[in-house]
Amino acid sequence: MIKLIASDLDGTLFPPHKGVPEETFSLVEKLYKKGIIFVPASGRQLPNLKKLFAPVLDKIAIIAENGGVVWFNGKIIYSNPTPSADVTRALFSIKTVKGLYPLLSCPDCAYFESDNPHFAEVVSRSYSSCKKVDSIEEAAKRATVLKISVWDEAPPSATHGEPLLAPKLPDLRVIASGYDWLDVSKKGANKGVALTELMQMLNIRKSECEAYGDHMNDYEMLSVCGRPFVTANAFAGLKKTFKNELASNAEYGVIKRLKEHLE
């Protein structure tokens, strides 16, 4: 029996250019009554996810910052920050690549320094708690950095920013997390490690967990669960590994799957 369902959001649960589907909260409530915990697992920051899922916060766990932090029962129960020296080194490398804009993803706030108005607009749409600073390096010295989110001005990031940045930081995890975003973090920080920690805390076996994703930053999460699914719109590289397929996010494939668990 499935006891936990983890789902990526952008490109997976969320339809294109839209937020939380209307039926989501009622389905989460019904799943909870059936003994199934729903877990939004996203690259988004924790404050943003808590705001999005406010109506059901007492019935879910949250994996935020692509596995950098796990929140459950009103508190952070796991975090995996990137060491300060690695953050400083990564920021230097990011700034050597034209068109890449770094943002520090921290537990309670995100920090950026660029004056690019387009970047500032993108950040304001995605981060409910963010702050512009004079020096992102100075901010990094004072903050606990879970990961560095990098906006790519010349997407797709999988074919532009990632191939340019990854060779500069071979000992860190550099991965496309969306069409125009990259993530830079320590090697052991990902959704799969975070989900494993959560399952152990809740005493849930791999066979009792199901997960949905659409991009390579979901790979580890899908690998550690017993029932992995990708959406029809998923990144081609992910679909080569995981053969169970849901309808696309535009066709509300995750919503349809959640309903199947209630039938």
Image: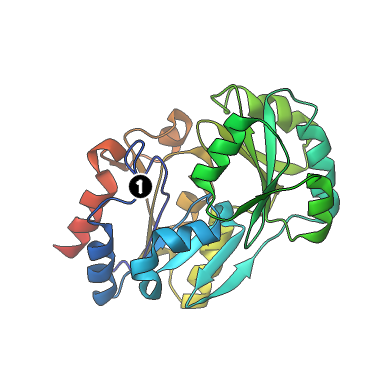
Does dot 1 land on a helix, a strand or a loop? loop
Q: Quadrant of the C terminus?
A: bottom left
In the foreground, 78 or 114: 114
Q: Give the image's coloring scheme.
A: rainbow
Q: Eyeballing the image, is 250 above or below 126? A: above
- The image shows residue 83 at horizontal and vertical percentages of 80, 56
Residue 30 in view (yes/no): yes
Q: Quadrant of the N terminus?
A: bottom left
| Residue at horizontal 44 percent and vertical 38 percent from the top | 241
Q: So how many labels did they put on this image?
A: 1
Q: Residues within 10 Å of mark 1 (few under 14, many from 20)?
A: few
| Residue at horizontal 42 percent and vertical 40 percent from the top | 214
Where residue 67 sits, quadrant-wise, is: bottom right
| Residue at horizontal 18 percent and vertical 56 percent from the top | 260
Where residue 152 sits, quadrant-wise, is: top right
- The image shows residue 43 at horizontal and vertical percentages of 53, 49
Mark 1: amino acid: Gly
Residue 177 in view (yes/no): no
Q: Eyeballing the image, is 176 above or below 36? A: above
Where residue 156 sits, quadrant-wise, is: top right
62 sits left or right of 4 in the view:
right
In the foreground, 125 or 22: 125
- The image shows residue 123 at horizontal and vertical percentages of 57, 42
Which residue is denoted by mark 1 in the rendering? 19
The single residue placed furthest to the left in the displayed view is: 263
| Residue at horizontal 72 percent and vertical 32 percent from the top | 166
262 sits left or right of 83 in the view:
left
Q: Eyeballing the image, is 181 above or below 156? A: below
